[in-house]
Image (cartoon, rainbow, N blue to C red):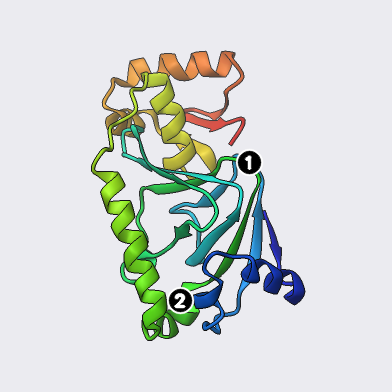
Amino acid sequence: MEKIYDKEKVSACIAGSKHHVVLGLLDVGFYLIKYEKGELVSSPFQKEILFQIVEEGSINIYFIRDDGTRYSLSNGAAGYFLGEMDIFYPKSNNIYVEAAENLTCIAFSVEKHRETLLANNKFLELICYSLSAKMGAMTTIEAAPASLTERVMSYMKYKCQDGTLKGIEQAAFHLHCSARHLQRILNQCEADGLVRKLGKGTYRLEKF
């Protein structure tokens, strides 16, 4: 991830945005963020609450249940909004956004500018349109079928801090499997080079 604060580059990106008319009315400290393919653009681990607008590239958005089951929520390209709900409600603990390819976003802090955003009717109109479209898309959501091994990998990547699973019994409870079954899977994943054993009952993803 790379943050860009160069005023000329930021202004040029805003001028080329499909939302440039409304963005030009906001004084919210815009900057750019570049992501590489596969990087998380937004996750529950993200400390700063950001509003981001995709300008180049595309994203995949999905929901991860506590048992590692993954639901595809949406995908987006240029003009797609991220962070609308964070203006009104606390950040979701289960939604992840990943760069499907190299990505450039216009960004600004939600926490620093919440009152400014809520006072701008044109901006709120855009938010309402975006959220309505997303709600319509969510009516067709289905859970992606996954093996227990795939769910273990998702659980470690998205539910474990720094991709590190600590405690076989607790993890098995969340994954709805026996501790013995989970241990067999972790042993195989270790043999395949997918995880590394750090200690008793502690494993870390190698490609987190």
Question: As drawn, is 30 to the left or to the right of 10?
Answer: left
Q: Quadrant of the C terminus?
A: top right
Q: Is residue 48 left or right of residue 133?
A: right
Mark number displayed over residue 37:
1
Q: CA distance from mark 2 to mark 1?
A: 27 Å
Reply above or below: 121 against 94.
Answer: below
Q: Name the secondary structure under disc 2.
A: helix
Residue beneath label 2, please? 111
* Residue at x 38% of width, y 28% of height: 168
Q: Is residue 90 visible?
A: no
Would residue 190 be found to the left or right of residue 89 on screen?
A: right
**Three-letter code for the amino acid on which mark 1 is drawn:** Lys
Secondary structure of residue under mark 1 = loop
Task: Tell me the residue at 35%/15% (across/down).
Answer: 181
Identified at 44% across, 47% down, the residue is 96
Identify which residue is drawn at 31% across, 33% down.
67
171, 139: nearer the viewer: 139
What's the amino acid at mark 2?
Glu
Coordinates of residue 48 in the picture (x, y in percent): 51, 66
Q: Residue furthest left?
A: 139
